[in-house]
Image: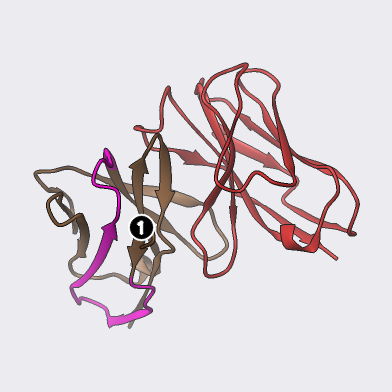
Amino acid sequence: NAGVTQTPKFQVLKTGQSMTLQCAQDMNHNSMYWYRQDPGMGLRLIYYSASEGTTDKGEVPNGYNVSRLNKREFSLRLESAAPSQTSVYFCASTYYDSNQPQHFGDGTRLSIL
Amino acid sequence: RKEVEQDPGPFNVPEGATVAFNCTYSNSASQSFFWYRQDCRKEPKLLMSVYSSGNEDGRFTAQLNRASQYISLLIRDSKLSDSATYLCVVLSQGNLIFGKGTKLSVKP
C-alpha cells in the first residue's frame, strides 16, 4: 500500500520554465491538497480539491494551477517558474473533510535558478 | 496575531527527560486539533489528535484548553528517536493551519 506518491522527488528548473508535479493516492480519499514548505515557515496551502471535479484556492495560489484528474490524482503546475517558488512541495489527502488527519507524500524538492 | 504560534526551540534535552511544547491559536471557532511530527527532510506524519478532555498515547499526552486557545504536548521519558520537529495543527475555517514547528533534540 503506497499511500500518497509524489513525482518527481527532486527537480531543478530555470526561471520561466514550466513543469507539473504529480500526486497520486491509493487510499480512496476524496480530498487532496498541495502545500509548500519554506525554511522558517509553516506549511502553507496552495490549492485543494475537496472532491473529484472541484478545486479551490488556498493561502498562496498565485503562480500555480491544479488539476484533479480523477479521484486518485491531483497535479500542480507551475506555468512560468520563478525563484520565489523554490520550496519543498507536499501533497496530502484525507477522507471527506479536513477534520480527519491528512496523509502526506514524501515531498518534491524544487529549485528554480 | 499569527493563526497558530509555537515556540520554535530548539529544545535540547537528555534522554529520559520530560519535555512540554505549547501552542496557541487565534481563531476561537477552530474545530479540530492535531500534533504532527516531521523528521528532517521528511513529510509530516500525524502523531496524535487532541481532544477536549485531553488524551494520552503511551509517553505522549496532549491537552486542549479552549478558553485560553492553548494546546500542549507532553513527552515523558524522552528517547533519541523522539528527535524531530513537532507541528501544532488547527482546523480553522475548513482548512488545516500549521504552526512553524518546535524542534526537539534528545541527546544521549
Number of marks present in the image shown: 1
In the rendered structure, does residue B28 fall within the stretch colored magenta?
Answer: yes
The residue that appears at 40% across and 34% down in the rendered structure is B94
A28 to B76, vertically: above or below: above
Q: In which quarter of the image is the C terminus of chain A?
A: bottom right
**Which sits in the foreground, A35 or B81?**
A35
Q: Name the residue under label 1.
A: B4
The tint chain A carries is red
Q: Which amino acid does label 1 sit on?
A: Val
Q: In which quarter of the image is the N terminus of chain A?
A: top right
The tint chain B carries is brown
**Residue A51 on image: x %, y %:** 54, 20
Is residue B31 shown left or right of residue B44?
left
**Residue A13 on image: x %, y %:** 86, 57
Q: In which quarter of the image is residue B103?
A: bottom left
B94 to B74, vertically: above or below: above
Q: Which residue lies furthest to the left in this view?
A: B53
Is residue B22 shown left or right of residue A112?
left
Q: What stretch is highlighted in magenta?
A: B7-32
B46 to B9, vertically: above or below: above
The residue that appears at 90% across and 50% down in the rendered structure is A17
Q: What element carries label 1?
A: strand
How many residues crowd around disc 1 within 10 Å: few (fewer than 14), some, or many (20 or more)?
many
B77 to B97, vertically: above or below: below
